[in-house]
Image (spheres, rainbow, N blue to C red):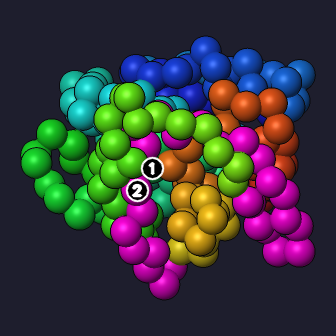
């Protein structure tokens, strides 16, 4: 089993540690080139600075290979915080981020506020008949404004949607890698492997 973490910028180390906690024998590849995507069974877009990640994807010619892995090869993909920004549609386009637009949600970057408004809270995650409360860590988190018909709401902060599932994409506005109680998220991600 091989997991690719898009390693252009962001909390790559923490995602790797979280994956190893969940599945100790997993091989983790830090994706920086198209060749690094070979043989990847799951893909992770970590949190970080979405404008920087967007620029570096273009600089290293990774945008189209990543798009193909997600949309054509249907590789199960976890996108957290900046990752969901990169895959979705933005309500306000300041030109700093070129999102893929493949996730049927509209969101606002830093919708929960800046760094000083970062917080932890209980998040309810629901998959089919399974429901679990996990700790959600929100750091300059984006805010989902609209969930389209293709996406299913699966994570909630009170009544507010903070996570969606669309085909092979599991996308969250918070950081599961910063908590020890998010096994349900990795379990769902791995269940998407065909």
The image quadrant where one finds the N terminus is top right
Choose between 70 and 164: the one closer to the eye.
164
Q: Is residue 34 magenta?
A: no
What are the residue bounds of the magenta stretch? 124-150
Residue 165 visible in rendering: no
Q: Label 2: few (<14), some or many (≥20) within 10 Å?
A: many
The one of 90 and 118 positioned closer to us in this rendering: 118
Snapshot quadrant of residue 5: top right
Q: Nearer the viewer, residue 14 or 120?
A: 120
Residue 55, position in %: x, y?
22, 30
Q: Find residue 53 and report its image quarter.
A: top left
Q: Which residue is mark 2?
A: 143
Q: Is residue 163 above or below residue 45?
A: below
SS type, badge 2: strand
Query: What's the magenta bit mostly, secondary-structure-wise?
Result: strand
Residue 148 appears in view: yes
Q: Which mark is residue 37?
A: none
Residue sitting farthest toward the bottom: 149
- Where is residue 6? Give x, y as percent: 49, 29
Res. 154 image quadrant: bottom right
Q: Quadrant of the C terminus?
A: bottom right
On whether residue 142 falls in the magenta region, the answer is yes
Check disc 1 and report the residue beneath it: 84
For the point 73% across and 18% down, the residue is 17
CB within 8 Å, label 2 to label 1: no
Would you say 193 lies left or right of 23 here?
left
Q: Classify 39 as above or below 32.
A: below
Which residue sits furthest left?
95
State how many labels appear: 2
**Mark found first going from the N terminus, 2 or 1:** 1
Structural crowding at the residue carrying mark 1, measured as other residues with C-alpha within 10 Å and reported as few (<14), some (14–19) or many (≥20): many
Gap in Å between the C-alphas at discs 2 and 1?
Answer: 10 Å
């Amino acid at each position: 089993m091989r997991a690719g973490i898009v390693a252009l910028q962001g909390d790559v180390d923490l995602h790797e540690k979280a994956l190893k906690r969940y599945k100790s024998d997993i091989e983790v590849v830090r994706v920086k080139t198209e060749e690094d995507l070979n043989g990847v069974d799951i893909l992770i877009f970590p949190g970080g600075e979405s404008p920087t990640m967007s620029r570096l994807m273009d600089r290293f010619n990774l945008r189209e290979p990543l798009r193909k892995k997600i949309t054509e090869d249907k590789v199960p993909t976890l996108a957290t915080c900046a990752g969901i920004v990169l895959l979705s549609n933005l309500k306000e386009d300041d030109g700093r981020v070129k999102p893929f637009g493949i996730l049927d949600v509209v969101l606002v970057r830093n919708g929960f506020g800046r760094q000083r408004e970062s917080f932890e809270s209980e998040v309810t995650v629901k998959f089919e008949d399974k429901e679990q409360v996990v700790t959600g860590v929100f750091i300059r988190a984006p805010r989902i404004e609209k969930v389209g018909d293709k996406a299913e709401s699966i994570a909630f902060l009170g009544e507010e949607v903070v996570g969606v599932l669309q085909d092979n994409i599991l996308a969250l506005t918070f950081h599961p890698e910063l908590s020890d109680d998010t096994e349900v998220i990795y379990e769902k991600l791995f269940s998407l492997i065909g």
